[in-house]
Image (cartoon, rainbow, N blue to C red):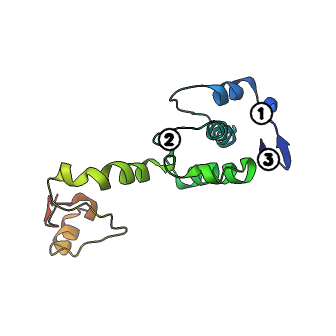
Amino acid sequence: MCKMGGWVLRIEDFSKDKINIIKKDGVFVVKACAGSGKTCVVAAKISSLLKEWISPNRGIAAISFTNVAWQEIEDKLKKDFGADSGLYYPHFIGTIDSFIDKYLLLPFGHLVLNCENRPEIIMNWEPEIRGKLECKKSGCKLSNLSYDINGNSFGFG
């Protein structure tokens, strides 16, 4: 059930298309316009899966493009479906970026980059660049620069 507009919506009150999504098996993507009820349907789907989940080493991945979307799904799961305990490992709810960081880059990035240490994620980093003034004069942006694994810049232009 989802609370929408102050009233409780039961699964049988969903439209036929939404019930089909909730009951659908396998891997799929839910795409629809804003305000169509995607978040509620995804939360209902995850909740129904969690109730029957038995595998300790396999999980549900609900991946969105924005923090707002995954936080709304998590909020509905907790408030409307009481699904606090099932939202952690082996399950994942978050952005595509956080999924890649957590399950691909951090555990395996050193293998791809051919270095000894695990990569670190550093937020809001702006390097000290010797050529900052040169870059500014030529009209390039910091995002035009690239860095090797040792932090050396290259690619002005």
Observer-nearest residue: 143 or 88? Answer: 88
**In what element is the residue under mark 1?**
helix
Q: Nearer the viewer, mark 2 or mark 1?
A: 2
Residue in the picture at 69% in, 29% down: 18
Q: Give the amino acid type for the residue marked by disc 1 in the picture.
A: Ile
Give residue 22's quadrant in the image. Answer: top right
**In what element is the residue under mark 2?**
loop
Residue in the picture at 74% in, 23% down: 16
Q: Compute the Cα span from label 2 to label 3.
A: 26 Å
Residue in the picture at 52% in, 51% down: 66
**On the rendered image, what quadrant is the C terminus found in?**
bottom left
Residue 3: give its label: 3
**In what element is the residue under mark 3?**
strand
Q: Give the amino acid type for the residue marked by disc 2 in the picture.
A: Gly
- In the rendered image, which residue does mark 2 sit on? 59
- In the rendered image, which residue does mark 1 sit on? 11
- Please give left or right for residue 4 compared with residue 20 in the image: right
The first of marks 2 and 1 along the sequence is 1
Q: Position of residue 65 (x, y in %)?
A: 49, 47
The first of marks 2 and 3 along the sequence is 3
Q: Position of residue 14 (x, y in %)?
A: 77, 31
- Please give left or right for residue 31 compared with residue 9 in the image: left
Q: Is residue 53 above or below residue 152?
A: above
Q: Nearer the viewer, mark 2 or mark 3?
A: 2
Residue 114: give its label: none
* Contact? badges 1 and 3 (CB < 8 Å): no
Give residue 25's quadrant in the image. Answer: top right
Q: Give the amino acid type for the residue marked by disc 3 in the picture.
A: Lys
Observer-nearest residue: 144 or 40? Answer: 40
Mark 3 burial class by Cα count in 10 Å: few <14, some 14-19, many 20+ = some
